[in-house]
Amino acid sequence: MKIRYGLACLAVGCLTGLGGMLLSWILHAVQHIAYGYSLQHVISEESFLKGSMAASPLRRLEVLVFCGAVVGGGWGLLRHFGSPLVSITQAVAANKRVMPFWTTIIHVLLQIVTVGLGSPLGREVAPRELGSLIGERFAFWGGLSENQRRILVACGAGAGLASVYNVPLSGALFALEALLMTWASPVVIVALLTSALSARMAWILLGNSMVYHVPAWPVDTRLMLLALLAGPIFGIAAHYFRFWSQKITASRIKDNRRLALVAILCFAAIGLLSMWFPEILGNGKGPVSLAFNDNLSGMKAGELFCFKILAVFLALWAGAYGGLLTPGISFGALLAVVIGHLWNMWLPPVPIGAFAIIGGAAFLASSMKMPITAMALVIEFARTGHDFLIPIAFAVAGSIAISQFYDQKKQPKTASKSVISHLGG
Amino acid sequence: MKIRYGLACLAVGCLTGLGGMLLSWILHAVQHIAYGYSLQHVISEESFLKGSMAASPLRRLEVLVFCGAVVGGGWGLLRHFGSPLVSITQAVAANKRVMPFWTTIIHVLLQIVTVGLGSPLGREVAPRELGSLIGERFAFWGGLSENQRRILVACGAGAGLASVYNVPLSGALFALEALLMTWASPVVIVALLTSALSARMAWILLGNSMVYHVPAWPVDTRLMLLALLAGPIFGIAAHYFRFWSQKITASRIKDNRRLALVAILCFAAIGLLSMWFPEILGNGKGPVSLAFNDNLSGMKAGELFCFKILAVFLALWAGAYGGLLTPGISFGALLAVVIGHLWNMWLPPVPIGAFAIIGGAAFLASSMKMPITAMALVIEFARTGHDFLIPIAFAVAGSIAISQFYDQKKQPKTASKSVISHLGG
């Protein structure tokens, strides 16, 4: 039993890493073909932002209409012919729901293809779901216990995240904080091992890649003060974003016949927006990169913030699936650029790029409700120095505090009870 | 209530930071006076390792005998006249035990003075206890709930750790992982805020200090493989170290009259050892620094490993109090140097300094039973690059796995039960 569990962990780490690597490869291939850039390389120096901006505005519109057709047609057919989808959260919950194999695989591929075509959602749910599926299958094959199955499903999801973004620590923390809510050593072992293995495996094709290349921004007392003061603003924005994106997801079109038409129309609208704002396309990496490098004016960042949110809401309503992790960082970073420019007008100036990194963490912490993982993710993404930890901690604490306050206003009793039960008190 | 809780958090963060800063200052002053180096500066460029090695061997023996007298006399008198001590763990447990104010303060100062005089234990329990005491007092003054008191006591301890070592993230994780075992957002907010504030406060006097200056060691597949294979060795060593240090602590001298004599004799023995091995004195920072920079031969590292453990056991048996955190890292780093040199004799060579960093994390993870905090601490101490995360995760996972296995052998039922209850399954 112990040996089979150990072997299953190793297999989940290795296979999820290879799977995530493959999904990254497909994503890049789709991007290059759709927007016609760097066609001879799949892993190129040319970023999606550069490539999609170089394409003609009309081409962007056409690709997005096609993307809408894939969304409508793909998920419409999947819903009609496939088994009902089981989310990672449902699979981790101890109710023995099994993720359907082929339906999940097609669901994963559809996400990757549509994000590659320019859907404004994140690509990281696809490798997470693939990792969970792998974890679940190995738990069945090894005849593992129900508890071990739950751990493997969650750690598979973390490993998926670790592989596509090369973030071994954040992958493990995601499994522990966002999915299992435990610090127990036996679970920590599996989370660390699968996540680190998976991240290493993906190096084979992707190399030891770095998500954002960011200059070494200085951290001083002004920046810390601004982080402390502005934390709650990110919390409020993230709270409302979370609220509306859940509401819109819940009210997405149920009728399969109308789905294709609605999807094409919604994605055509995103395409129209992208004719003037190509930065809103894709998972949000482009605007984040611009914000972290201080390459955006306050005005431009404000426009991108509004239109990117609009695009995400349109995509969700049109029935597209995808992650809200990279989009979340991009909203935080863009909002931070706006706040930073306002601050710099009258007050002792802070480095805008540095504040964008802090804002990305603060928004993500509340929008995904995972403060520690959000901190670790942004630090691994931007490979910031140690000094950033203090202002990031301030901003994340302020952001989480205010979104917690809003949540408690809605359901005051259950929230405070769950805190006590977590403490075992 | 909410406002008073918020103000208490801010106060605990600020005051613990200032307190930790003051304790660091006292430690340095005692070190400089005792070993007679850099007398005009309290915060100097000259490390304790250099200073104590420059002192004559006889002076080291004399200082250690004096240290033994302080240990025996100090804790003997404190036990006779003071109130019974309440540990942080006891104060965090929901049984309303109150930390006695003056006894705890004197206990904290005794730890700092004896470590400054060369006691081979860590200095980080003192600021942790001070932080917990501050947290508890503010919880009483603010009339906070029992649950809020527990959170403030634990986060005060984390903030104390954060201030003396300038490790804001590890301080927060320590409170969450080692003391409260929770990921609940309301607790995470307090942990991040107090820890970051406290670390920032200590900058006032100590500057944005860095614990270890380490060259940028390369990370390659060989190092990852060695980390994966050697992880369990660190786990076994840490398990036995933990077992024996607990056993020795439990069997320390109870009789106050004999205490002073035993303490002087034990510390005289440590002093004799230090005439030939001055590196074993103090909290272990010296040997760690040598190991991380690859300035030790395998033979020398093996000797230091054995004698440093012997010195710690002698100090614990003699009735001295102190931390096992920096000592834990030093044991792991020294053992790693030994293993690394053995590996390099026959197999493709790995950078010894890099492997020492990995070994420090792997040993600490098991000896203190806090894998995530140990990873974060070593990364914050050595400010390693992102690439280190994968081999460190491998080594920590292997180390924790084997020490978990030993623990389960002893009490198979309670251990597995607690894991399930943590998962809420």
Image (tube, coloured by chain):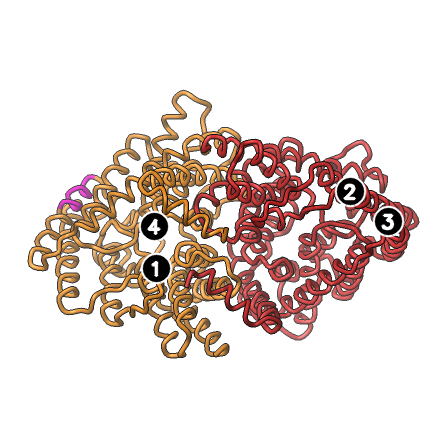
Chain colours: A orange, B red
Left or right: A113, with B121 as reference point: left
In three-dimensional space, the C-alpha distance between marks 3 and 4, rounded to whole angstroms, equals: 56 Å
Measured from the top left, where is residue A345 in percent x and y?
38, 22
Q: Which mark is residue B110?
A: 2
- Element assignment for label 3: helix
Which residue occupies the foreground of this view, B259 or B22? Answer: B259
Mark 1 secondary-structure assignment: loop
Which residue is identified by label 4?
Answer: A325
Q: In the rendered structure, the residue with mark 2 lies on which chain?
A: B
First of labels 3, 2 by sequence position: 3
Q: Are marks 3 and 2 in contact (CB under 8 Å)?
A: no
Dot 3 falls on which chain? B
The residue under label 2 is which amino acid type?
Leu
Q: Which mark is residue B68?
A: 3
Q: Is residue A259 above or below residue A242?
A: below
Q: Is residue A323 left or right of residue B415?
A: left
Q: Residue at 64% x, 39% y: name it.
A: B133
- The reply to whether label 3 and label 4 mark residues of one chain is no
Using the numbered discs, state the Cα–Cα distance from disc 3 to disc 2 in whole angstroms: 12 Å
Q: Position of residue A376 (x, y in %)?
A: 46, 50
Given the image, on which type of amino acid does mark 1 rest?
Ile
Spatial CA span between label 3 and label 1: 64 Å
Q: Mark 2 and mark 4: span between their CA atoms?
A: 49 Å
The answer to whether residue B275 is visible is no
Label 3 neighbourhood size at 10 Å, few (<14), some (14-19), many (20+)? many
Q: Amino acid at mark 3?
A: Gly
Along the line of sight, the residue nearer the viewer: B312 or A389? B312
Inspect the image, locate mark 4, and give the three-letter code of the amino acid beneath it.
Leu
Q: Which residue is mark 1?
A: A43
Badge 4 local density, few (<14 within 10 Å), some, or many (20+)?
Answer: many
